Amino acid sequence: SDVDECATGLHKCDISARCHNYVGGYACFCPTGYRKVDGGACVDIDECSESNGACCSVNATCINKQGSYGCVCNEGFFGDGYKCMPLEKRGCTEAEWAVANCGKNHMCMVDSKGNKDCDMCKMGFEMKDGECVGKFLSLRELCLSYMGN
């Protein structure tokens, strides 16, 4: 009759490996997400460094976990990490503008999650050291700015 090395503890599998009995012997397997190294131990596969989380969206960051990995959408995007869509932005309402406390030459924008930012300048201004300051306008830009377009 066959001896079950796995059940009796007669196997030589590393503690991190799984023992599988078969007639006449046994085999040691690493769990999914792990790889066998010299000596028989199972070590985590870092899917992020090996394949940059091959299934992650280009707009996501790969996060390695023991035995697996996950994907998290980058700032400015939403989704499950495998599919990330840009957050739609619109101009702030007066109430949102008051809460955002943007400088007078900044544009207040709000995304679909309600996050407000003041990272853009109104036409005719440019960002310098976090502030929107006046810039030289061409005649065309001056006309567009004056006309409100």
Image (spheres, rainbow, N blue to C red):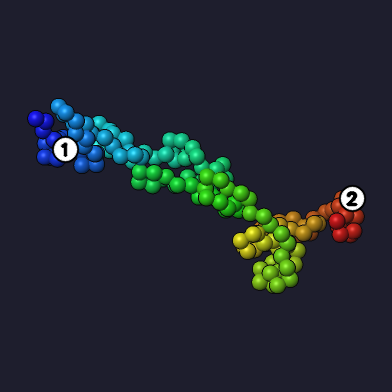
Q: Which mark is residue 140?
A: 2
Residue 149, position as x, y percentages in the image: 85, 56
Residue at image coords 42%, 39%:
47
Residue 24, position as x, y percentages in the image: 14, 27
Seen as rendered, the residue at the extreme left is 1
Residue 146, position as x, y percentages in the image: 89, 59
Residue at image coords 74%, 71%:
94
Residue 1, position as x, y percentages in the image: 9, 30
Quadrant assignment, res 13: top left
Q: Is 91 left or right of 41, judged from the image as shown? A: right
Residue at image coords 56%, 51%:
79
Q: Is 47 left or right of 135, judged from the image as shown? A: left
Q: Neighbour class for label 2 at 10 Å: few (<14), some, many (≥20)?
A: few
Q: Neighbour class for label 1 at 10 Å: few (<14), some, many (≥20)?
A: some
Q: Can residue 131 be seen in this snapshot?
A: no
What type is the residue that disc 1 sits on?
Cys
Residue closer to the observer: 26 or 57: 26
What type is the residue that disc 2 sits on?
Arg
Q: Is 128 left or right of 74, judged from the image as shown? A: right
Residue at image coords 74%, 55%:
126
User: Residue beneath label 1, please?
Assistant: 6
